[in-house]
Amino acid sequence: MQYLETIKALDGKLYNLKYHQRRLDETVKNSNIILKDALTPPSAGLFRCRVVYDGKNYEVTYHPYKKKNIKTLKLVFDDDLSYSKKYYDRSRIDTLLRQKSSCDDILIVKNGLITDTSIANIAFKYKNNWITPKKPLLEGTTRARLLERHKILEEDISIKDLENFNQVALMNAMIDFAIIPNENIREIIC
């Protein structure tokens, strides 16, 4: 089984490495991979550092990064999808992504609850709080950091709850916490 870590590297600096190392260590017990020793990102520019590993072996590649402009999300349903670890094989998610039609990305619903998009954890603003699904497909590193710092809260979120929110944000290692600028949830969820 192969797994994946995607780490932000900007001008030679690696971001949130302790959260990536923690997830790697939880994914593969007794791994000999120490990310801070294995990574040497380019010294200038924004890069997606991609680490593919199986616990004993790993491969590191660096890719220039350009943020995707996500403004709309299509609800898709899959009660059997399991992505509790960041697997290298994303074929099941890619299959769901083909259902996005004219939307920019998908918002995956599992057993009636909102989980994640195809590339990011999600949060919704309710009054003065940002709420993220209690049961995401993947417990992302940015999500973990923001939960630890009490910047976001966890709750179960059903489809009917969506009408109560007035903002949406995506979060992952590369974009950190990116708010979708539209405040009309009905225009975001297509």
Image (spheres, rainbow, N blue to C red):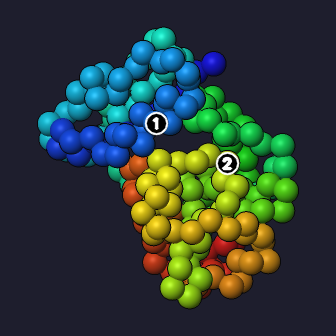
- Secondary structure type for disc 1: helix
Look at discs 2 and 1 and give the one toward the viewer. 1
- Provide the residue designation for mark 2: 137
- Residue 108 in sight: yes
Expressed as whole percent of the image width and height from the top left, the position of residue 5 reads: 46, 34
State yes or no: discs 2 and 1 in contact (Cβ < 8 Å).
no
- Spatial distance from mark 2 to mark 1, Cα to Cα? 17 Å
Kind of residue at badge 2: Leu
Residue at 44 percent of width and 55 percent of height:
145
Quadrant (top left/top right/bottom left/bottom right) for the C terminus: bottom right
Residue 98 relative to residue 49: left or right: right
Can you tell which mark lies on residue 22?
1
| The image quarter in which residue 7 lies | top left
Expressed as whole percent of the image width and height from the top left, the position of residue 85 reads: 62, 35
- Secondary structure type for disc 2: loop
Expressed as whole percent of the image width and height from the top left, the position of residue 48 reads: 35, 39
Residue at 50 percent of width and 56 percent of height:
143
Kind of residue at badge 1: Arg
Residue 23 relative to residue 73: left or right: left
Residue at 57 percent of width and 29 percent of height:
27
Residue at 67 percent of width and 81 percent of height:
186
Q: Residue furthest top?
A: 56
In the depicted structure, whether residue 141 falls above or below residue 71 = above
**Total count of labels:** 2
In the depicted structure, whether residue 31 falls above or below residue 3 = above
**Residue nearest the observer in this picture, 64 or 11:** 11
Marked residue nearer the N-terminal end (2 or 1): 1
The residue carrying pointer 1 sits among few (fewer than 14), some (14 to 19) or many (20 or more) residues within 10 Å by Cα, namely: few
Quadrant (top left/top right/bottom left/bottom right) for the N terminus: top right
